[in-house]
Amino acid sequence: MSSCWATLQDYGLRSIGIGERILPKIDITICEQVVLIGSGLIWNIYFGIIAVFFGFWFSIILAVGKNHKLALFRIPSESIIFVFRGSPLFIQFFFAYEFFVLLPKVGIEFDLGFITLSAETRWLTRAWLGGLIVLFFNTAAYSAEIFYGAIRSVSSGELEAAEAYGITGWSKFWRIIWPSMLRLAWPSYTNEAIFLFHATSLIFFSGFPAWRQSGDALYYANYFADKTFNPFLPYPIAAMYFILLTLVIISIFGVANKYLNRHLDVEQRAKIQISINILR
Amino acid sequence: MFNVCADPSTLTEFFWVICYLTTAKHFAFYVSFLVVLMLLAIAAPLSLLFGFIAAIGTRSSNWIIQIFSKSYINMVRGIPDVVFFLFVPLALDQFFEFIRHKIICFDVVEPIWQGTDFVVCKSAKLPLSTAELWVHQLYAFTLALIAFAIVFGAFAGNVLSGAMRAVPKTQTETGAAFGFTQKQTFWRILVPQMWIYAIPGLSNLWMILIKATPLLFLLGVEDIVYWARELGGSKTSMYAYPHPDWRVYYFAGLLVFYLLMTWASSKVLKRLQIKLSKGQATMAGKELQGY
């Protein structure tokens, strides 16, 4: 038990570069697998939280844009949604990585010795920024489709009542459409968030290199399966972590769901159920 | 391929492109698109079958079967599909080799798991080390196919068990009232009627399946992702067709391929849904009849 505590100190934060540098190679214990795969989960949570948080706001813009009368707003939103929902996330990662790799070469042609720019483009080829950008656009596109559907299903009676009271334009959106839209979309949006967190496990298998062997949960699970030739331990450990993560997401989003539905009778309230509709 | 292509360094730009796109490696790349389509063609019915069996299982009166099928169709909700794609082929491979080892080399006493190694006797290896390359590729493809069928079977099980529950109770009760046995009600009333409820979910699943095909790359199959990386990588003048890093263009091509696939599928599926809604006691069906 005490040795497992030492392992936790060595590898608990290994995925973000703190602790023992060299990964276990021989005589790999269960404790090492549990700790290191759990350490990798930090990356999944990082990608998930940041992408969901920023993607949420962008998706609202896209959803409103898709619903707009003017083609000038509608067509860009529709195209972004179509491209990111119509193609595999895996290919998006590959494409983005190769695209980002080419960027510095383009930049150097124009301003040689301009250090800040080349440094910035270099970060784009790292998973923490490049992968995050792809995830951000991806979740924004999927969520936008959900919110678009929700905007369309806000009851017309509510909108008419608002107009009768003279609420129009911006304040009609914020005070009438927005709360109803969120409430209607929330169960689907919860699913989107769950599957986004699942999708974060693709990043380190799709071109973005794991720098100094700092990867996510599945990266370490794959590492152990390669080293021990025994897939029956690391993958179920990773699976367990993801199930836990899913449960945490459901409970957090469930609190928000309760809040959004607080004005309704109990039997009218929407329940959150995991459905597989939002898988990418 | 063409005679003009014998010496690429002397070609004009136009012929260079033609010759470049018709090298043997590029044909392997084009064939890999067929591999993707083949995977779709086989995995879709197979996973539908798995899902159908699982959906029946969730209605079983035997609680062991019920729990097993329920956990099978629910596992995909909590666990990323990539985990299965990495786990299933490896696990199956070891399972097959383990069984073969026990049958073929029953006289070997050493344990199979030696420390960090998985050692089976030579003749139990799958495929045999003497086998040709295509056997290895076919084996990898088959394992990948099983992995896809298992994962998407679970998804299909979700859709189908939902569809079975969506068939109005009155329909099956009428069956019972006419003296149908449970089996007859199931096959003659429930199954023919459930599809209309399953179609939206299954259409969605088809799209997901299309978008999951590049994961073949993770399973060691030489698929379109593999060839895009292979062909796009920068080639020095050692090669017949030297060029800088073109991977981004190859992946752009793959993006377009997948966008076309999903776009065409969504058109076809929409039509199918309209067709199947005819004469159904659903809102869409009634709208078609002009109610």
Image: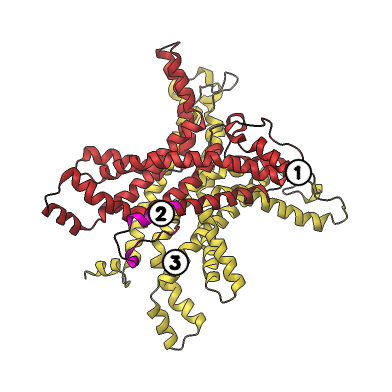
User: Around disc 2, counting alpha carbons within 10 Å, would you say few (fewer than 14), some (14 to 19), or many (20 or more)?
Assistant: few
Residue pointed to by mark 2: A255
Q: Are marks 2 and 3 in contact (CB under 8 Å)?
A: no
> Which chain is painted in red?
A
Q: Image height check: is A207 above or below B36?
A: above
Q: CA distance from mark 2 to mark 1?
A: 57 Å
Q: Residue at x 31, y 68 (%)?
A: B278
Describe residue A245's horizontal placement relative to residue B252 as left or right: right
Q: CA distance from mark 3 to mark 1?
A: 46 Å
Residue extent of the magenta highlight: A252-273
Q: Residue at x 38, y 56 (%)?
A: A187
As shown in the figure, which amino acid type bears the numbered disc 1? Ser
Is residue B59 visible in the rendered image? The answer is: yes
Who is closer to the viewer here, A273 or B108? A273
Circles 3 and 1 on the same chain: yes
Describe residue A150's horizontal placement relative to residue B57 as left or right: left
Residue A1: where, in percent of width, then height? 73, 46
* Chain of the residue on which disc 1 is drawn: B
Is residue B250 visible in the rendered image? The answer is: no
Please identify which colour was used for chain B in the image: yellow
As shown in the figure, which amino acid type bears the numbered disc 2? Val
* Chain of the residue on which disc 3 is drawn: B
Residue pointed to by mark 1: B129
Secondary structure beneath dot 3 equals helix
Circles 2 and 1 on the same chain: no
Q: Are marks 3 and 1 in contact (CB under 8 Å)?
A: no
Q: Residue at x 26, y 56 (%)?
A: A153
Who is closer to the viewer here, A51 or B74? A51
Which labelled disc corresponds to residue B162?
3
Which tag, 3 or 1, sits closer to the chain's start? 1
Residue A274: where, in percent of width, then height? 45, 57
